[in-house]
């Protein structure tokens, strides 16, 4: 893929923004929610800033984050809420206030580091026609839960799941922007991403009941053991859908893409879409990494007939979810998102 801008490290000593900029970040509970904005040069000042808070309220870094954002904002940061179980309200607020929010703005900086995957997708769909620069920021931690030692214990005792990143399923949700009514009467093909919470996919499949189910495993660029771990967690689903989820000679799931390099996800989705879109309702569940979710949002812009379903975890594990140490702060700069996606659609034959 040559059209998409590459993900690259943020060069903080050379970091600059336009005069009319909007900064969007999320409070979260992880220490890395503070990482990007705390590293900015004192001369960096955003025209506007939005801090998104989570509902229901739980552990939060809001009181630490707000002063940091305020320090780099010409206007006081505005706080908006995202209800994990009722995301339509967040989307409605963005859509109804879009003109006022984006008035005079020519650059938007979005720190997705601690954002919900669905939140990331809603934001990128909301900005699908924004003509200016969109800069995506992602702070990659050194470690994620569980550790290798914790996972080895889990393999020996499957009931010991206290160190998994999330638990249970609250509901399978969707919003107006992520939905499509195209081919509702047709059989469905579902594409989802492996995680440490297999219950999410079980809940999804009970709602959708697809004819075909493709599970995409994630390949971390550094923590390679996690690829094997997520395949182990989801081994029963792979066995239940063996034709779609074939293994190589080493017993490794063939369907796999990087958790960081978002272009790989887009390319994988494109290949499946061009093969199945004329006969099946195409459904994506963005249950993988945050950069994979970004790619799902970009794909939805290119293919409006794609429908999304998002199984929401019942609860998150706040202890050791991610390490405070940051391996790298990444950025992706879209100079003209709609123009880029038109070229991408043409290159991957997504125009019908």
Image (cartoon, rainbow, N blue to C red):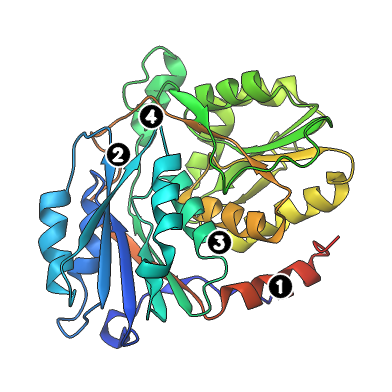
Where residue 329 sits, quadrant-wise, is: bottom left
According to the image, label 1 marks what residue?
342
Considering depth in this image, is 210 or 55 the residue closer to the camera? 55
Where residue 2 sits, quadrant-wise, is: bottom right
In this view of the protein, can residue 245 be seen by the observer? no
Disc nearer the start of the sequence (4/3): 4
Please state which of the two labelled residues, at mark 3 or mark 1, is closer to the viewer: 1
Q: CA distance from mark 1 to mark 4?
A: 36 Å
Instruction: Point out residue 296 in the picture as x, y percentages from the top left corner.
Output: 60, 52
Q: Secondary structure at mark 2?
A: loop
Instruction: Point out residue 162 in the picture as x, y percentages from the top left corner.
Output: 31, 21
According to the image, label 2 marks what residue?
321
According to the image, label 4 marks what residue?
166
Please state which of the two labelled residues, at mark 2 or mark 1, is closer to the viewer: 1
Q: CA distance from mark 4 to mark 3?
A: 24 Å
Residue drawn at 55 percent across, 73 percent down: 6
Q: Are marks 2 and 1 in contact (CB under 8 Å)?
A: no
Disc nearer the start of the sequence (3/1): 3
Instruction: Point out residue 268 in the picture as x, y percentages from the top left corner.
Output: 72, 53
Q: Quadrant of the N terminus?
A: bottom right
């Amino acid at each position: 893929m040559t059209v998409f801008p590459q993900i690259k490290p943020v060069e903080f000593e050379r970091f600059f923004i336009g005069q009319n900029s909007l900064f969007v970040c999320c409070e979260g509970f992880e220490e890395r929610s503070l990482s990007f904005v705390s590293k900015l040069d004192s001369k960096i000042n955003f025209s506007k800033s939005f801090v998104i808070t989570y509902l229901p309220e739980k552990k939060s870094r809001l009181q630490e984050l707000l002063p940091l954002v305020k320090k780099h904002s010409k206007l006081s940061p505005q706080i908006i809420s995202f209800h994990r179980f009722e995301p339509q309200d967040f989307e409605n607020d963005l859509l109804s206030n879009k003109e006022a929010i984006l008035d005079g703005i020519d650059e938007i900086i979005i720190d997705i580091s601690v954002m919900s995957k669905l939140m990331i997708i809603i934001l990128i769909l909301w900005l699908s026609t924004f003509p200016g620069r969109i800069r995506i920021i992602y702070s990659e931690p050194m470690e994620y839960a569980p550790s290798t030692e914790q996972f080895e214990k889990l393999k020996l005792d499957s009931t010991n799941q206290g160190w998994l990143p999330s638990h249970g399923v609250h509901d399978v949700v969707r919003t107006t922007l992520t939905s499509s009514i195209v081919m509702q009467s047709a059989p469905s093909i579902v594409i989802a991403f492996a995680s440490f919470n297999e219950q999410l996919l079980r809940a999804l499949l009970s709602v959708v009941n697809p004819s075909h189910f493709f599970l995409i495993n994630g390949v971390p660029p550094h923590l390679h053991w996690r690829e094997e771990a997520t395949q182990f967690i989801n081994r029963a689903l792979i066995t239940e859908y063996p034709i779609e989820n074939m293994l190589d000679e080493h017993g490794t799931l063939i369907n796999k893409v990087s958790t960081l390099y978002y272009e790989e996800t887009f390319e994988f989705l494109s290949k499946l879409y061009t093969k199945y879109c004329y006969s099946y309702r195409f459904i994506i569940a963005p249950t993988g990494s945050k950069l994979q979710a970004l790619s799902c949002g970009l794909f939805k812009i290119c293919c409006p007939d794609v429908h999304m379903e998002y199984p929401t975890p019942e609860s998150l594990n706040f202890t050791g979810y991610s390490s405070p140490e940051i391996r790298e702060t990444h950025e992706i700069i879209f100079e003209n998102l709609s123009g880029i996606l038109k070229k991408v659609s043409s290159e991957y034959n997504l125009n019908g």
